[in-house]
Amino acid sequence: MAVTATPRKLIVLGDSGVYGWGDPDGGGWCERLRRHWMGLPDGPVLYNLGVRGDGLERLAARLHREVGCRGELRRQAPQGIVLSVGLNDTARVGRPDGRHQLEPEAFLFGWQQLLREAVQLAPVLVVGLTPVDEAVMPFAGCLWYQQASVHRYERLLEEACLEADVPFLPLLHPLLEDPHWSRLLSADGLHLNADGHGRIYEQVRQWPALLAWAGLESRVARTPAH
C-alpha cells in the first residue's frame, strides 16, 4: 500500500485582511488560497489565523501559542508562517495629527523582534500593507488612516524583512499603480472588497517565494485560478 505523504502546514497570522473582512464572495484572499491549495493533490494545509483589529503587538503576543497548537500530529509543528499585519498600527488616534496606534520606531523594533522569534519556529514570509481612502476617514469615528503613513510603515516593514533575510511581498505600490485602485476598497475606505481580495489572492498565489516553500513552482503556469 502506498504511503500518503503528510501535507505541509502553513499558518497565516494577521488582521482583518487575513480574516477576509469585506469579501462575502470568496471569504478573503487567504480563504481563496486555502481553497485553491485544497484542490491540489499535493497542496499544503493552510490555517487562517486572522483577527480583526490586530496590530503588531497583539499578533506577536499570540505567535507561540498559535504555532504550538497547529501541528495536527504529535511532535509536529507547522512548516511555514506567513505574517500580514501593520495597517492598524499606522492609524492616528482621535484626530488627523494625533499619535499613531504604534509609533514608527516601535513598529520597526517590534517587527525586528517578531521576526527573530518567528524564524526560530519555521520559515517565515511577510505580506505588505494595502492602500486606504483618506476621503472617507475617520474610521470608526476616531481613527485616521493616511496614505503617507501606510507608505512609511511598509518601508519599515520591508527594512525589517531585509535585515532578517525574510521574503517580503509588497502590495501597496502594485495596487496603487491601478488608476482605479479605490474601487478595490470597501465603503469604509480601509478594508478590501471582493475585487481587492481577489487581486491580493492572485499576487500571493503566484508569489515565487511562497510557491518555492510549497513545492508548487511547476504548477503555477498550468493551474487555473479558482
Image (tube, rainbow, N blue to C red):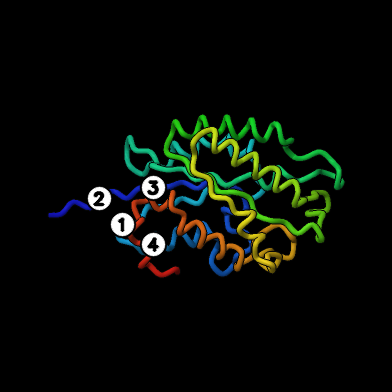
Q: Are there few (<14), some (14-19), or many (20+) residues within 10 Å of tag 2?
A: few
**Mark toward the start of the polypeptide (3 vs 1):** 1
Question: Residue 93's image quarter?
Answer: top right
Residue at horizontal 74 percent and vertical 61 percent from the top: 188
For mark 3, what is the residue? 213
- Asked if the residue under mark 2 is in contact with the one under mark 3, i.e. CB atoms within 8 Å, the reply is no
**In this picture, residue 197 sits left or right of residue 134:** left
What amino acid is labelled 4 in the image? Answer: Val
**Mark toward the start of the polypeptide (1 vs 4):** 1
For mark 4, what is the residue? 220
What amino acid is labelled 3 in the image? Answer: Trp
Please provide percent x and percent y for residue 45. Answer: 39, 52
Give the spatial CA distance, label 4 vs label 3: 13 Å
What amino acid is labelled 1 in the image? Answer: Asp
Give the spatial CA distance, label 2 vs label 4: 21 Å
Residue at horizontal 70 percent and vertical 32 percent from the top: 105
- Asked if the residue under mark 1 is in contact with the one under mark 2, i.e. CB atoms within 8 Å, the reply is yes
**Mark toward the start of the polypeptide (3 vs 2):** 2
